[in-house]
Image (tube, rainbow, N blue to C red):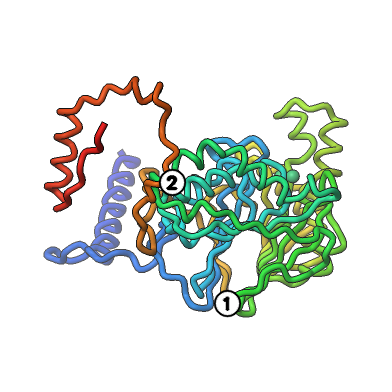
Amino acid sequence: MKTKIILAFATGFTLCAGLFTWMAVAPSLGDSSPVEALSEQDVYYPGSEDLAPDEMRIVACGTGMPNARPKQAAACFLVELGNGDKFIFDIGSGSAERISAMKIPYDYLDKVFIGHLHSDHFGDLGDLWIGGVIGNRIKPLRVWGPSGHKPEFGTKYALDRMQEMYTWDSGSRLGNVDIRGQVLEVTEFDYKAVNKVIYNENGVTIRSIPAIHALDGPVSFILEWNGLKFAYSSDTFPNQWWIEHTKGCDIAIHECFIPPEDLVRKQKWTPAAALNVGTQVHTSPAQFGKVMSDIKPRLAVGYHFFNDFDTLPNVTKGVRKTYDGPLALATDYMVFNVTKDDIKVRMAVIDEDIWPQPAVGKKLPPDRSKRIGFSEFIKGGRVPYKNVVDEIYSEINKKYGTNIPVPGE
Ligand SMILES: [Zn+2]
Ligand SMILES: [Zn+2]
Protein backbone atom coordinates (compact mmCIF):
# COMPACT_ATOMS: atom_id res chain seq x y z
CA MET A 1 0.00 0.00 0.00
CA LYS A 2 2.77 2.33 0.98
CA THR A 3 4.49 1.66 -2.31
CA LYS A 4 1.28 2.44 -4.25
CA ILE A 5 0.91 5.84 -2.55
CA ILE A 6 4.47 6.75 -3.30
CA LEU A 7 3.99 5.70 -6.92
CA ALA A 8 0.77 7.71 -7.22
CA PHE A 9 2.47 10.72 -5.69
CA ALA A 10 5.42 10.36 -7.99
CA THR A 11 3.20 10.01 -11.06
CA GLY A 12 1.14 13.04 -10.04
CA PHE A 13 4.27 15.07 -9.53
CA THR A 14 5.62 14.07 -12.93
CA LEU A 15 2.36 15.01 -14.62
CA CYS A 16 2.32 18.40 -12.86
CA ALA A 17 5.95 19.07 -13.72
CA GLY A 18 5.26 18.06 -17.35
CA LEU A 19 2.26 20.38 -17.53
CA PHE A 20 4.23 23.35 -16.19
CA THR A 21 7.02 22.69 -18.68
CA TRP A 22 4.53 22.49 -21.56
CA MET A 23 2.83 25.70 -20.46
CA ALA A 24 6.20 27.45 -20.38
CA VAL A 25 7.19 26.53 -23.98
CA ALA A 26 3.93 26.02 -25.87
CA PRO A 27 2.49 28.91 -27.90
CA SER A 28 -0.68 30.31 -26.51
CA LEU A 29 -3.81 29.13 -28.31
CA GLY A 30 -4.65 31.26 -31.32
CA ASP A 31 -1.05 31.80 -32.46
CA SER A 32 -0.57 30.66 -36.07
CA SER A 33 2.20 28.33 -37.19
CA PRO A 34 5.14 30.01 -38.96
CA VAL A 35 4.86 30.05 -42.76
CA GLU A 36 8.13 31.76 -43.78
CA ALA A 37 10.97 29.82 -45.45
CA LEU A 38 13.91 29.04 -43.22
CA SER A 39 16.64 31.65 -43.54
CA GLU A 40 19.43 29.09 -43.78
CA GLN A 41 19.52 25.51 -45.03
CA ASP A 42 21.79 22.71 -43.92
CA VAL A 43 21.92 21.51 -47.51
CA TYR A 44 22.53 23.17 -50.87
CA TYR A 45 19.73 23.21 -53.42
CA PRO A 46 21.40 23.98 -56.80
CA GLY A 47 20.25 27.23 -58.35
CA SER A 48 18.74 28.50 -55.12
CA GLU A 49 21.57 30.59 -53.64
CA ASP A 50 23.39 33.75 -54.70
CA LEU A 51 27.16 33.50 -54.69
CA ALA A 52 28.68 36.51 -52.90
CA PRO A 53 31.13 38.59 -54.99
CA ASP A 54 34.05 37.37 -52.86
CA GLU A 55 32.93 33.75 -52.56
CA MET A 56 34.06 30.50 -54.20
CA ARG A 57 31.74 27.50 -54.41
CA ILE A 58 33.14 24.07 -55.23
CA VAL A 59 30.90 21.11 -55.96
CA ALA A 60 32.24 17.56 -55.94
CA CYS A 61 30.74 16.11 -59.14
CA GLY A 62 32.86 12.94 -59.04
CA THR A 63 34.88 11.56 -56.15
CA GLY A 64 35.00 7.79 -56.65
CA MET A 65 37.23 5.21 -58.27
CA PRO A 66 37.84 4.37 -61.95
CA ASN A 67 34.62 2.35 -62.13
CA ALA A 68 31.78 4.86 -61.87
CA ARG A 69 28.86 3.71 -59.71
CA PRO A 70 25.45 5.21 -58.91
CA LYS A 71 26.68 6.78 -55.68
CA GLN A 72 29.95 8.15 -57.02
CA ALA A 73 31.09 9.20 -60.48
CA ALA A 74 34.81 9.36 -61.26
CA ALA A 75 36.92 12.48 -60.68
CA CYS A 76 35.30 15.87 -61.30
CA PHE A 77 35.17 19.15 -59.36
CA LEU A 78 33.18 22.20 -60.44
CA VAL A 79 34.49 25.57 -59.25
CA GLU A 80 32.19 28.62 -59.35
CA LEU A 81 33.48 32.08 -58.52
CA GLY A 82 31.66 35.18 -57.30
CA ASN A 83 32.64 36.98 -60.54
CA GLY A 84 30.47 34.49 -62.47
CA ASP A 85 33.29 32.36 -63.89
CA LYS A 86 32.97 28.59 -63.74
CA PHE A 87 35.63 25.92 -64.24
CA ILE A 88 35.52 22.14 -64.42
CA PHE A 89 38.56 20.25 -63.14
CA ASP A 90 38.62 16.71 -64.59
CA ILE A 91 35.49 15.21 -66.07
CA GLY A 92 35.63 11.50 -65.23
CA SER A 93 33.16 8.81 -66.20
CA GLY A 94 29.66 9.48 -64.93
CA SER A 95 30.32 13.09 -63.90
CA ALA A 96 28.39 14.81 -66.73
CA GLU A 97 25.06 14.03 -65.09
CA ARG A 98 26.28 15.49 -61.79
CA ILE A 99 27.33 18.67 -63.59
CA SER A 100 23.90 18.92 -65.22
CA ALA A 101 22.28 18.61 -61.79
CA MET A 102 23.79 21.99 -60.83
CA LYS A 103 21.25 23.73 -63.12
CA ILE A 104 23.86 25.89 -64.86
CA PRO A 105 23.34 26.82 -68.53
CA TYR A 106 25.87 24.94 -70.68
CA ASP A 107 27.17 28.21 -72.13
CA TYR A 108 28.78 28.88 -68.76
CA LEU A 109 30.27 25.37 -68.52
CA ASP A 110 32.75 26.01 -71.30
CA LYS A 111 36.12 25.62 -69.54
CA VAL A 112 37.52 22.17 -68.66
CA PHE A 113 40.95 21.43 -67.20
CA ILE A 114 42.10 17.82 -67.50
CA GLY A 115 44.80 16.61 -65.10
CA HIS A 116 45.65 13.47 -67.07
CA LEU A 117 44.17 11.21 -69.69
CA HIS A 118 42.89 8.30 -67.61
CA SER A 119 39.24 7.62 -68.45
CA ASP A 120 38.25 8.25 -64.84
CA HIS A 121 39.48 11.84 -65.34
CA PHE A 122 38.16 12.66 -68.80
CA GLY A 123 35.74 9.86 -69.70
CA ASP A 124 32.68 12.14 -69.80
CA LEU A 125 34.27 14.91 -71.88
CA GLY A 126 32.52 13.67 -75.03
CA ASP A 127 29.24 13.77 -73.15
CA LEU A 128 29.73 17.38 -72.03
CA TRP A 129 30.89 18.34 -75.52
CA ILE A 130 28.08 16.70 -77.52
CA GLY A 131 25.48 16.80 -74.72
CA GLY A 132 26.22 20.49 -74.26
CA VAL A 133 25.30 21.19 -77.90
CA ILE A 134 21.96 19.43 -77.46
CA GLY A 135 21.63 21.16 -74.08
CA ASN A 136 21.75 24.61 -75.74
CA ARG A 137 25.46 25.53 -75.58
CA ILE A 138 26.14 27.90 -78.47
CA LYS A 139 29.78 28.63 -77.58
CA PRO A 140 32.87 26.50 -78.24
CA LEU A 141 33.98 24.13 -75.47
CA ARG A 142 37.49 25.07 -74.29
CA VAL A 143 39.72 22.33 -72.91
CA TRP A 144 43.17 22.56 -71.33
CA GLY A 145 45.33 19.48 -70.78
CA PRO A 146 48.97 18.39 -70.58
CA SER A 147 51.38 17.16 -73.23
CA GLY A 148 52.91 13.69 -72.92
CA HIS A 149 56.40 12.22 -73.28
CA LYS A 150 55.51 11.71 -76.98
CA PRO A 151 52.94 13.68 -79.03
CA GLU A 152 50.56 10.69 -79.12
CA PHE A 153 50.40 10.70 -75.31
CA GLY A 154 49.25 14.33 -75.20
CA THR A 155 45.82 15.93 -74.78
CA LYS A 156 45.67 17.25 -78.33
CA TYR A 157 46.20 13.78 -79.83
CA ALA A 158 43.50 12.31 -77.58
CA LEU A 159 40.94 15.02 -78.32
CA ASP A 160 41.62 15.02 -82.07
CA ARG A 161 40.82 11.29 -81.99
CA MET A 162 37.78 11.91 -79.80
CA GLN A 163 36.44 14.27 -82.45
CA GLU A 164 37.12 11.62 -85.12
CA MET A 165 35.36 9.03 -82.97
CA TYR A 166 32.27 11.24 -82.98
CA THR A 167 32.31 11.79 -86.78
CA TRP A 168 28.91 10.16 -87.27
CA ASP A 169 27.43 11.95 -84.25
CA SER A 170 28.69 15.38 -85.36
CA GLY A 171 27.68 14.75 -88.97
CA SER A 172 24.17 13.77 -87.92
CA ARG A 173 23.63 17.18 -86.33
CA LEU A 174 24.76 19.28 -89.31
CA GLY A 175 21.80 21.22 -90.62
CA ASN A 176 19.54 19.97 -87.81
CA VAL A 177 20.64 22.03 -84.80
CA ASP A 178 22.68 25.17 -84.04
CA ILE A 179 26.16 23.64 -84.04
CA ARG A 180 28.25 26.56 -82.81
CA GLY A 181 28.79 24.65 -79.57
CA GLN A 182 30.34 21.80 -81.51
CA VAL A 183 33.66 23.65 -81.80
CA LEU A 184 36.30 22.19 -79.47
CA GLU A 185 39.21 24.50 -78.61
CA VAL A 186 42.12 22.52 -77.17
CA THR A 187 45.08 24.08 -75.41
CA GLU A 188 47.88 21.63 -74.71
CA PHE A 189 50.58 22.81 -72.32
CA ASP A 190 53.93 21.41 -71.20
CA TYR A 191 53.44 18.83 -68.46
CA LYS A 192 56.91 19.58 -67.09
CA ALA A 193 56.23 23.30 -66.57
CA VAL A 194 56.40 24.16 -62.87
CA ASN A 195 53.85 26.65 -61.57
CA LYS A 196 53.49 28.20 -65.01
CA VAL A 197 50.35 30.17 -65.85
CA ILE A 198 48.14 28.30 -68.32
CA TYR A 199 45.05 30.50 -67.93
CA ASN A 200 44.78 34.18 -67.02
CA GLU A 201 41.46 35.91 -67.69
CA ASN A 202 39.04 38.09 -65.78
CA GLY A 203 41.20 38.14 -62.61
CA VAL A 204 41.52 34.34 -62.49
CA THR A 205 44.92 32.66 -62.75
CA ILE A 206 45.38 28.92 -63.19
CA ARG A 207 48.81 27.33 -62.97
CA SER A 208 49.94 23.76 -63.50
CA ILE A 209 52.57 21.74 -61.69
CA PRO A 210 53.82 18.26 -62.63
CA ALA A 211 52.17 15.28 -60.94
CA ILE A 212 53.64 11.78 -60.58
CA HIS A 213 51.19 9.09 -61.67
CA ALA A 214 51.44 6.02 -63.91
CA LEU A 215 53.41 7.68 -66.77
CA ASP A 216 54.90 11.07 -67.57
CA GLY A 217 52.17 13.62 -68.41
CA PRO A 218 49.84 14.09 -65.40
CA VAL A 219 49.60 17.51 -63.74
CA SER A 220 47.91 19.20 -60.78
CA PHE A 221 46.24 22.62 -60.91
CA ILE A 222 46.28 25.74 -58.74
CA LEU A 223 43.56 28.37 -59.23
CA GLU A 224 43.90 31.81 -57.66
CA TRP A 225 41.24 34.51 -57.60
CA ASN A 226 40.41 37.38 -55.29
CA GLY A 227 42.96 36.31 -52.66
CA LEU A 228 41.63 32.72 -52.55
CA LYS A 229 43.74 29.74 -53.57
CA PHE A 230 42.28 26.40 -54.70
CA ALA A 231 44.55 23.41 -55.38
CA TYR A 232 43.48 20.21 -57.12
CA SER A 233 45.85 17.26 -57.44
CA SER A 234 43.99 15.14 -59.99
CA ASP A 235 46.04 11.92 -59.44
CA THR A 236 49.50 12.00 -57.97
CA PHE A 237 52.01 10.33 -55.71
CA PRO A 238 53.18 12.82 -53.06
CA ASN A 239 55.60 15.17 -54.77
CA GLN A 240 57.85 18.18 -54.20
CA TRP A 241 55.99 20.53 -56.57
CA TRP A 242 52.66 20.10 -54.78
CA ILE A 243 54.28 20.55 -51.38
CA GLU A 244 56.15 23.67 -52.50
CA HIS A 245 53.38 25.43 -54.43
CA THR A 246 50.17 24.65 -52.52
CA LYS A 247 51.39 25.54 -49.03
CA GLY A 248 48.81 27.41 -46.98
CA CYS A 249 46.15 27.33 -49.71
CA ASP A 250 42.50 27.82 -48.78
CA ILE A 251 41.30 24.46 -50.04
CA ALA A 252 43.48 21.53 -51.09
CA ILE A 253 41.73 18.69 -52.90
CA HIS A 254 44.12 15.77 -53.19
CA GLU A 255 43.65 12.14 -54.04
CA CYS A 256 43.35 9.83 -51.03
CA PHE A 257 43.08 6.34 -52.49
CA ILE A 258 41.34 3.39 -50.86
CA PRO A 259 43.76 1.74 -48.38
CA PRO A 260 45.57 -1.39 -49.67
CA GLU A 261 43.81 -3.71 -47.21
CA ASP A 262 40.41 -2.59 -48.54
CA LEU A 263 41.54 -3.20 -52.12
CA VAL A 264 42.29 -6.77 -51.03
CA ARG A 265 39.12 -7.15 -48.91
CA LYS A 266 36.56 -5.49 -51.21
CA GLN A 267 38.05 -5.76 -54.67
CA LYS A 268 39.85 -9.11 -54.21
CA TRP A 269 43.20 -7.80 -55.38
CA THR A 270 46.42 -9.56 -54.42
CA PRO A 271 48.36 -7.81 -51.61
CA ALA A 272 51.19 -7.06 -54.07
CA ALA A 273 48.84 -5.34 -56.55
CA ALA A 274 47.04 -3.49 -53.75
CA LEU A 275 50.31 -2.17 -52.31
CA ASN A 276 51.63 -1.12 -55.72
CA VAL A 277 48.47 0.69 -56.87
CA GLY A 278 47.46 1.90 -53.40
CA THR A 279 50.79 3.42 -52.32
CA GLN A 280 52.99 3.81 -55.44
CA VAL A 281 50.65 4.72 -58.34
CA HIS A 282 48.28 6.54 -55.95
CA THR A 283 48.45 8.23 -52.54
CA SER A 284 47.18 6.19 -49.59
CA PRO A 285 45.30 7.88 -46.69
CA ALA A 286 48.38 7.96 -44.44
CA GLN A 287 50.48 9.49 -47.26
CA PHE A 288 47.66 11.99 -47.94
CA GLY A 289 47.73 12.98 -44.26
CA LYS A 290 51.48 13.56 -44.41
CA VAL A 291 51.08 15.77 -47.49
CA MET A 292 48.41 17.85 -45.72
CA SER A 293 50.56 18.18 -42.59
CA ASP A 294 53.29 19.58 -44.84
CA ILE A 295 51.13 22.14 -46.68
CA LYS A 296 48.62 23.00 -43.92
CA PRO A 297 45.64 24.17 -46.01
CA ARG A 298 42.63 25.85 -44.40
CA LEU A 299 40.72 22.72 -45.46
CA ALA A 300 42.09 19.39 -46.70
CA VAL A 301 39.78 17.40 -48.96
CA GLY A 302 40.46 13.75 -49.77
CA TYR A 303 38.79 12.03 -52.72
CA HIS A 304 39.25 9.03 -55.03
CA PHE A 305 37.87 6.26 -52.82
CA PHE A 306 34.51 4.54 -52.48
CA ASN A 307 33.16 6.42 -49.48
CA ASP A 308 31.02 3.84 -47.62
CA PHE A 309 30.15 3.02 -44.03
CA ASP A 310 32.66 0.18 -44.11
CA THR A 311 35.53 2.06 -45.77
CA LEU A 312 35.34 5.54 -44.25
CA PRO A 313 36.58 4.51 -40.75
CA ASN A 314 39.71 2.93 -42.21
CA VAL A 315 40.40 5.88 -44.52
CA THR A 316 39.91 8.31 -41.61
CA LYS A 317 42.19 6.22 -39.39
CA GLY A 318 44.93 6.31 -42.05
CA VAL A 319 44.67 10.08 -42.54
CA ARG A 320 44.58 10.76 -38.80
CA LYS A 321 47.82 8.83 -38.26
CA THR A 322 49.64 11.69 -39.97
CA TYR A 323 47.33 14.76 -40.00
CA ASP A 324 45.20 16.43 -37.36
CA GLY A 325 43.99 19.52 -39.23
CA PRO A 326 40.65 20.44 -40.84
CA LEU A 327 39.47 17.61 -43.09
CA ALA A 328 36.61 16.60 -45.39
CA LEU A 329 36.55 13.16 -47.00
CA ALA A 330 34.54 13.79 -50.11
CA THR A 331 31.64 12.03 -51.69
CA ASP A 332 29.60 13.16 -54.71
CA TYR A 333 27.56 16.35 -54.24
CA MET A 334 29.62 17.59 -51.30
CA VAL A 335 29.67 21.40 -51.58
CA PHE A 336 32.31 23.78 -50.24
CA ASN A 337 31.61 27.51 -49.88
CA VAL A 338 34.91 29.31 -49.39
CA THR A 339 35.45 32.93 -48.33
CA LYS A 340 38.36 34.55 -46.53
CA ASP A 341 36.54 34.18 -43.21
CA ASP A 342 34.79 30.85 -43.50
CA ILE A 343 34.64 27.49 -45.23
CA LYS A 344 31.24 25.86 -45.13
CA VAL A 345 30.86 22.19 -46.08
CA ARG A 346 27.41 20.80 -46.93
CA MET A 347 25.76 18.27 -49.17
CA ALA A 348 23.75 19.26 -52.23
CA VAL A 349 20.24 17.91 -52.67
CA ILE A 350 19.56 17.47 -56.36
CA ASP A 351 16.49 17.36 -58.52
CA GLU A 352 16.61 14.08 -60.44
CA ASP A 353 14.10 15.39 -62.98
CA ILE A 354 16.51 18.08 -64.18
CA TRP A 355 16.36 19.38 -67.78
CA PRO A 356 19.07 21.40 -69.56
CA GLN A 357 18.80 25.14 -68.96
CA PRO A 358 17.87 27.47 -71.86
CA ALA A 359 20.60 28.97 -74.05
CA VAL A 360 22.08 32.22 -72.79
CA GLY A 361 22.20 33.82 -76.25
CA LYS A 362 19.84 33.47 -79.19
CA LYS A 363 20.04 30.14 -80.99
CA LEU A 364 20.38 30.26 -84.76
CA PRO A 365 18.14 28.21 -87.03
CA PRO A 366 20.08 25.25 -88.46
CA ASP A 367 21.69 25.73 -91.84
CA ARG A 368 19.76 23.18 -93.90
CA SER A 369 22.26 23.39 -96.74
CA LYS A 370 24.78 21.61 -94.46
CA ARG A 371 22.58 18.56 -94.04
CA ILE A 372 24.23 15.33 -95.17
CA GLY A 373 20.89 13.61 -95.75
CA PHE A 374 19.93 10.01 -96.51
CA SER A 375 20.72 7.79 -99.44
CA GLU A 376 17.89 7.10 -101.89
CA PHE A 377 17.76 3.54 -100.51
CA ILE A 378 17.08 4.62 -96.92
CA LYS A 379 14.81 7.47 -97.97
CA GLY A 380 12.76 4.97 -99.97
CA GLY A 381 12.00 3.01 -96.79
CA ARG A 382 10.23 5.85 -94.97
CA VAL A 383 6.59 5.35 -93.96
CA PRO A 384 5.47 8.99 -93.53
CA TYR A 385 2.01 8.57 -91.87
CA LYS A 386 1.18 11.89 -93.54
CA ASN A 387 -2.10 12.56 -91.73
CA VAL A 388 -0.51 12.05 -88.31
CA VAL A 389 2.45 14.32 -89.05
CA ASP A 390 0.24 16.97 -90.72
CA GLU A 391 -1.80 17.14 -87.53
CA ILE A 392 1.31 17.54 -85.32
CA TYR A 393 2.57 20.41 -87.50
CA SER A 394 -0.80 22.11 -87.52
CA GLU A 395 -1.17 21.85 -83.71
CA ILE A 396 2.30 23.26 -83.10
CA ASN A 397 1.80 26.06 -85.64
CA LYS A 398 -1.50 26.98 -83.99
CA LYS A 399 -0.05 26.89 -80.47
CA TYR A 400 3.03 29.00 -81.22
CA GLY A 401 1.65 31.22 -84.00
CA THR A 402 4.13 29.81 -86.53
CA ASN A 403 3.73 28.69 -90.10
CA ILE A 404 6.21 25.83 -90.48
CA PRO A 405 5.44 23.70 -93.54
CA VAL A 406 5.54 19.92 -93.45
CA PRO A 407 8.70 18.96 -95.38
CA GLY A 408 7.96 17.61 -98.83
CA GLU A 409 8.72 14.02 -99.62
ZN1 LIG B 1 44.79 8.26 -63.03
ZN1 LIG C 1 42.14 8.57 -60.99
State whether residue 226 is above or below residue 35: below
Q: Quadrant of the N terminus?
A: top left
Ligand 2 shows up in the quarter that is top right
| Residue 94, picture quadrant | top right
Q: Which residue is mark 1?
A: 202
The residue labelled by disc 2 is: 370
Q: Is residue 151 left or right of residue 80?
A: right
287 is higher (above) or lower (below) than 26: above
Name the secondary structure under disc 2: helix
Which of the two residues, 253 or 97, is positioned nearer the viewer here?
Answer: 97
What count of labels does the image hold?
2
Left or right, 240 with respect to 307, comes to right
* Mark 2 and mark 1: Cα distance apart in space: 36 Å
Residue 320's spot in the image, x, y percent? 75, 54
CA neighbours of label 2 inside 10 A, class few (<14), some (14 to 19), many (20+): few
The amino acid pointed to by label 1 is Asn
Secondary structure under badge 1? Answer: loop
Residue sitting at 17 percent across and 44 percent down?
Answer: 396
Q: Is residue 128 visible?
A: yes
Q: Give coordinates of residue 266: x percent, y percent.
A: 70, 29
Mark 1 crowd level (few <14, some 14–19, many ≥20, 10 Å Cα):
few
Amino acid marked by disc 2 = Lys
Nearer to us in this view, 152 or 104: 152
Camera-near label (2 vs 1) is: 2
Up the image or down, 101 lies above or below 44; here it is above
Closer to the N terminus: mark 2 or mark 1?
Answer: 1
